[in-house]
Amino acid sequence: MQIKNIGKEKALQKIKHYCTYQERCHKEVKEKLYSFGLYKNETEIVLSQMIEENYLNEERYAIAFAGGKFRLNHWGKIKIGYELKQKGVSEYCINKALDAIGENEYSETLNKLYKEKLRTLKEKNVFSARKKLYAYLSQKGYESNLISGIIKGLT
């Protein structure tokens, strides 16, 4: 099925609205522009104009994404970094975003998740409980050395 090209000017208006509503990464905007039927050269022109006019900023996007996923979903830095990498964000911006997460808040969130999960476990065996806690916290994206440190206190 052929997608009708809506034109560069109309696409620019639509994509500005799209980026004003919420922070977007370059990859999302590119895909949206292609969905409007724009050709590669038109897409690149619109994309560069969006960056010039500060509608698109990869660093700002990465920091907003990392902060949101950490505060709302309680994701760890590993999972956040992986997701940003999947979205095509540069390594520099990923590191900047992960550094923006405060260490105190990070360890408090890890402790809170640990305590909540420990409360819901019905395991009698300490080793089995440790295994489940480790699996849960690593699935959330926390670093193995931090998880091991917090779980060691479980007896």
Image (cartoon, rainbow, N blue to C red):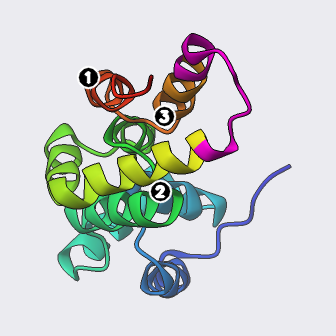
Residue 40 locus on image (x, y percent): 45, 50
Q: Is residue 146 left or right of residue 37?
A: left
Q: Which residue lies furthest to the right in this view?
A: 1
Work out how far the residue at label 3 is from the one at label 2, CA to CA, in angstroms. Answer: 34 Å
- Residue 150 sits above or below residue 21 on the image: above
Q: Is residue 42 magenta?
A: no
As shown in the figure, which amino acid type bears the numbered disc 2? Lys
As shown in the figure, which amino acid type bears the numbered disc 3? Leu
Q: Name the residue carrying label 1.
A: 145
Which badge, 2 or 1, is on the more N-terminal residue? Answer: 2
Task: Tell me where the magenta segment starts and ends, as one range.
Answer: 119-130
- Residue 14 sits above or below residue 100 on the image: below
As shown in the figure, which amino acid type bears the numbered disc 1? Asn
Please rate how many residues cluster around mark 1, counting C-alpha atoms within 10 Å: few if below 14, some from 14 to 19, many from 20.
Answer: few
The residue drawn where x is 39% and y is 45% is 80
Q: Is residue 29 left or right of residue 129?
A: left
Q: Does the magenta stretch include residue 122?
A: yes
Work out how far the residue at label 2 is from the one at label 1, CA to CA, in angstroms. Answer: 38 Å
Q: Is residue 31 left or right of residue 103?
A: right
Image-quadrant location for residue 14: bottom right
Q: Which mark is nearer the camera, 2 or 1?
A: 1
Residue 94 locus on image (x, y percent): 23, 46
The residue drawn where x is 38% and y is 57% is 26
Q: Name the residue carrying label 3.
A: 137
